[in-house]
Image (cartoon, grey):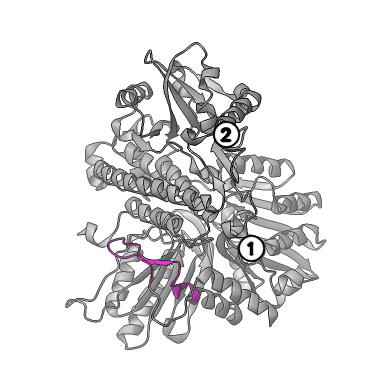
Amino acid sequence: MEKEIYKHRDVNWLFFNERVLLEAAEKTTPPFERLKFLAIFSSNLDEYFKVRVSQLRQLKKVDKPLRKKLMLRPNKKLKYILKVIDGQQQRFGSILRDILEDLRGHDIHFPDLDHLTDAQKKYISEYFAEHIQNDCEILGMDENPKLMDGRLYLLVYFFDENFNFVKIPTDRHPRFVEIPGEGTTYVFLDSVLKMNLEKLFPEKQIAGSYAIKLSRDAELYLEDDYGDTALVERIYESLGQRKSGQPTRLLYDSKMPENLRKSLRNHLNLGKVDLFPGGTFHNFSDFFGFGNPTGNPKLNYGQKEPLPHPVLSNSTDFFASIAEKDSIVHFPYQSFDSVEKFMLTAARDEHVEHIKMTLYRIAKTSVLTDALLTALENGKKVTLFIEAKARFDERNNIEWGKIFQKQGAQVFFSVPNIKVHSKIALVERREGRVLRRYAYIGTGNFNAKTAKLYCDHGLFTAHPQITEDLHQVFSTLDRKLIVPKLKQLLVSPYTTRHTFLQCIENEIKHRLKGKSASISIKMNSLEDKTMIDALYRASDAGVKIRLLVRGFCCLVPNTKDEAHPNREPIQVTSIVDRYLEHGRIYVFENGGDEKMYIGSADWMGRNLDRRIEVLTPILDKAVFAELNHILQLQFSDNVKARIQDASDSNERVRQEQGGKAIRSQYAIYDYLQLKLKK
């Protein structure tokens, strides 16, 4: 029964990544943007193998009685997952060929080695000798532990049946090498090496060369998926020696002979399931940095500069502006400089006494980190809560934490057994005899770079109850309180789940009384079964439910049947477009007195129970109307939105005949631009 009403998160994630692949296949998308979608697909898949497939592989080793208790069937899931990925990889190759054909029409060429002219071959030979040869690292057969995670290698096979690994030096040289030729012509750095292997192995007879990439397991964070600490410990004990960095997937050129594949697999101590066929080239995430060599505007999306905020960007007194009225910012449509200005103003303002902030993913360099250092130089108290277990950002976060500590900040690295995922900042300012607080509560990280790509929202407010609640949150984080006393904010793991369940039950009660009832939610992921069950109950009672879920969604959209004549089928859509949808917005009709929350939490067990998450109500009517208009534009999207149905078809939302085409991300930009002119 469970399989029928809940989708498996790791399986459903594949259909999110398929939506990325479908954007790469879209011929109306400019060709370099199509390449970027392939890069995103490739990067997503790499992380998926490092984290999710890694977990399934390791759970296979869990004692059978414990696996049975957890209802785990990792072998069955792995087989299905690998089958789906194999089909997607084949489609990937077909899409890539189509894009390269499209680029040829714009006089940009990636010729096969067989089609190079003698002059081009000579250029490549000279280029290799002058620029590349000295940077080529050769590893013998006995040096396989040195194969780095995610790095590209050529497996060079000799007629004596031995082989060596050559690391492709993409850390020192561009992946794409421009060569003389028709229009603008490139070859892969991999090809440059392949054509010059005799220079690296002058005394050996080369039988062939094939690109490979080894992925290694990331560290297991089972705490993210299982709430029972004792159960997690039992799993870890059952696994025995669990090490991150173990080889997990070998992506290889499908042209590699079977006997060589077998020899390589044995040499790297991999199972058959760990070998994955690919094309001639790997690591298409390198296309992120390709750019536009010709400057042809038809090859990329048209420029959309971030808009200034209508109030904050021109404010000469930032704190007075926030005190007067709440303000909402929307990235990447509006400039991130409002957040930077908030922190810089606080750092320099003589009346500011204390800055408190949570940092989940810290940029290597940024205006925000500079502002915090300036605040410390100016003698202000700075308290930072830095997540030391933000996957793939651990080292950078810890290094920054040590820098801040050295400069005098009070730094807390995580909270025992719980991650700090909230995006919050609080500034305490002495105004006469009163200590006034100013808050920022967002849906996305304090990162100017990702703010250009991720669709997020952030609220600036001086509302007394909200800022007092935020003060309570920070007091809990620095161990002064055990549990925060909250009046307005939803904070995980304390009040978020209970409040959202209460909101759903209220909608059910209103509907049963014959009143209008609806729930509109935008989030990244929906996994929690208790929340899904509550939505099912609301749907059966006749509550209208619209969900916009970017990533995986474990809810199975239902239909009316004889047993549920009042049921309102749940509508689930997803948008993959120019920007990454990342915001979380929750709206409940509430008998006509609508409630709206925004913040950092999705409806996953980890976000509701095992992380510090903060969501704020939207109390200002103008801010509410603005956010609601943006949400409705996204629900109306009929250009980039796809349907998440029971069969994971990923079909486009159909435009009604004679209706207006709505591409929500562009419509949001136009809406905010129009507000500037009013």
Q: Position of residue 507 (x, y in %)?
A: 37, 79
- Mark 1 lies on a secondary structure that is loop
Q: Which mark is residue 170?
A: 2
Q: Is residue 565 above or below residue 428?
A: below
Frontmost residue, 502 versus 192: 192
Sequence-first disc among 1 and 2: 2
Q: Is residue 483 visible?
A: no
Residue stretch rendered in magenta on the structure: 633-653
Q: Position of residue 560 (x, y in %)?
A: 23, 76
Check disc 1 and report the residue beneath it.
Answer: 303
Q: Is residue 197 above or below residue 590?
A: above
Disc 1/disc 2 C-alpha distance (Å): 29 Å
Decide if residue 440 is on the left or right side of residue 227. Answer: right
The N terminus, quarter of image: bottom left
Q: Position of residue 517 (x, y in %)?
A: 38, 82
Residue placed at 54% from the left, 60% from the top?
579
Overall secondary structure of the magenta stretch? loop
Frontmost residue, 381 versus 171: 171
Give, as a three-letter code, the residue at label 1.
Answer: Gln
Rendering quarter of residue 338: bottom right
Frontmost residue, 658 versus 570: 658
Q: Is residue 35 above or below residue 6?
A: above
Residue 648: in magenta span: yes
- Mark 2 lies on a secondary structure that is loop
Rendering quarter of residue 428: bottom right
- Label 1 neighbour load within 10 Å: few <14, some 14-19, many 20+: few
Residue 72: in magenta span: no
Decide if residue 552 is on the left or right side of residue 72. Answer: right
Q: Position of residue 426 (x, y in %)?
A: 66, 62
Q: Is residue 220 visible?
A: yes
